[in-house]
Amino acid sequence: MMKNKRNALGRGLSAILRNPKTDITENRDNEKNLVSTINNISIQDIQINPFQPRTEFDEEKLFELSESIKELGIIQPITVRKLGYNKYQLISGERRLRASKILNLKTIPSYIRIANDEQMLEMALVENIQRDNLNPIDIALSFQRLIKECNLTQEECGNKLGKQRSTITNFLRLLKLPSKIQEGLKKERITVGHARALININDKENQLNIYHDIIESGFSVREVEQIAKDFIDRKYQFSGKVKKTKSENIIAFAHQKKIFDLSKNLNQKIELKTTKKGNGKIIIPFSNEDELSDIFNKIKL
C-alpha cells in the first residue's frame, strides 16, 4: 500500500501529460486541477481557443506587444489545457500567442490546466470579460454565451463575474439593436449611452435614422434620450445633412421637435421631407375644407 502511494505521488508532470485520463473529459475529479509549474510548450502544438469571445485583434497593438516581448520576454505565461500527448488548446493569452508567432518564437511559457468544454468556455469568457479593452458588443455576446452554453441565469452569470444582474441585462439588450448600430458601437462611432437610448425606440427605421444623425450631427447622449422620448411612436426623418457646429446640431433637433409638437397639436401625421441640398417640404394632410380651416386656426393663420 505504501509503495503504491509513493508511486502515485512521484508521477511528475510528464506522467500527467501522457495520461489519457487527463485529456478532455467530463471527469469532475479533475475539473480544478491546475499544474502550477510553468512549462515551455511548442507553439505549433497549441490550438487556438474555439471559445474565444474576442472577435477582433488590433494588428498595430499586436506588433507593439511583439516588440515588448522581444525586449522583455513574456512576463505572464499563457494558460492551456491538454488535449493529448503534445497537444494543447489555448484557454487564455491569445494576444501573447499571436505576438509570439509574429516573432517566430518556437516555444512559449504556459500553465497547463485540465478542463472540460464547459469549464473551458467559462474560463475563456470570464478571463476576457474582465479585460477593459473588450468592446461592448463582444462583452454582450460573451454574457449571452455564458448564459446559454453554460446553462446559467442572468443572476448566476453576474455572481460569477462579480457584477449586478442589471449590468448583465443592460449589455444583453444591446444585442437587440440592428446590426449596423451594433457595428457602430464596436467601432466607437457611438457610445453605450447613445445605444441604450436607442434601445428604447421600438421602430427599427427610427433607430437607424437617429443613429445616422448621431454620427453626422454629433448629438449628445442627452439629446438622443430626448429624441427617443419625443419620437417613441412617431417617425423620425434622417436629416442627411452634416452639421459642423454645436448650435447647428441643436437647431436640427429643434426642427424635429417642432414637427412632433405641431403634429400632436393638430392631431395629424405630418411628414417632413428634406434633400441633400438642405431644402424640403412639410406635408400636412386634410380631408376637407373644414379640416383645413381647423388647421389654419390652430397654427394661427
Image (cartoon, rainbow, N blue to C red):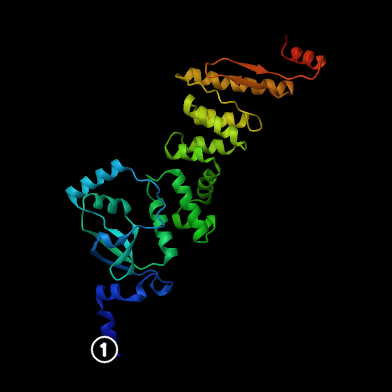
What residue occupies the far left of the structure in this picture?
A: 71
| Residue 245 percent location from the top left of the image | 45, 18
The residue that label 1 is drawn on is 3
214 in relation to 87, above or below: above
Image quadrant assignment for residue 67: top left
Give the position of the C terminus as an image quadrant: top right
Give the position of the N terminus as an image quadrant: bottom left
Residue at 57 percent of width and 34 percent of height: 207
The one of 156 and 239 positioned closer to us in this rendering: 239
The crowd level at tag 1 (other Cα within 10 Å; few <14, some 14-19, many 20+) is few
What residue occupies the far bottom of the structure in this picture?
A: 1
What residue occupies the far top of the structure in this picture?
A: 301
34 in relation to 226, above or below: below
Residue at 76 percent of width and 19 percent of height: 286
Residue at 54 percent of width and 40 percent of height: 178
Q: Is residue 255 left or right of residue 25?
A: right
Label tally: 1
Residue at 48 percent of width and 55 percent of height: 145
Q: Is residue 221 left or right of residue 94?
A: right
119 in relation to 102, above or below: below
The one of 285 and 113 positioned closer to us in this rendering: 285
| Residue 181 percent location from the top left of the image | 50, 37
| Residue 196 percent location from the top left of the image | 53, 38
Label 1 SS: helix
Q: Is residue 279 left or right of residue 131?
A: right
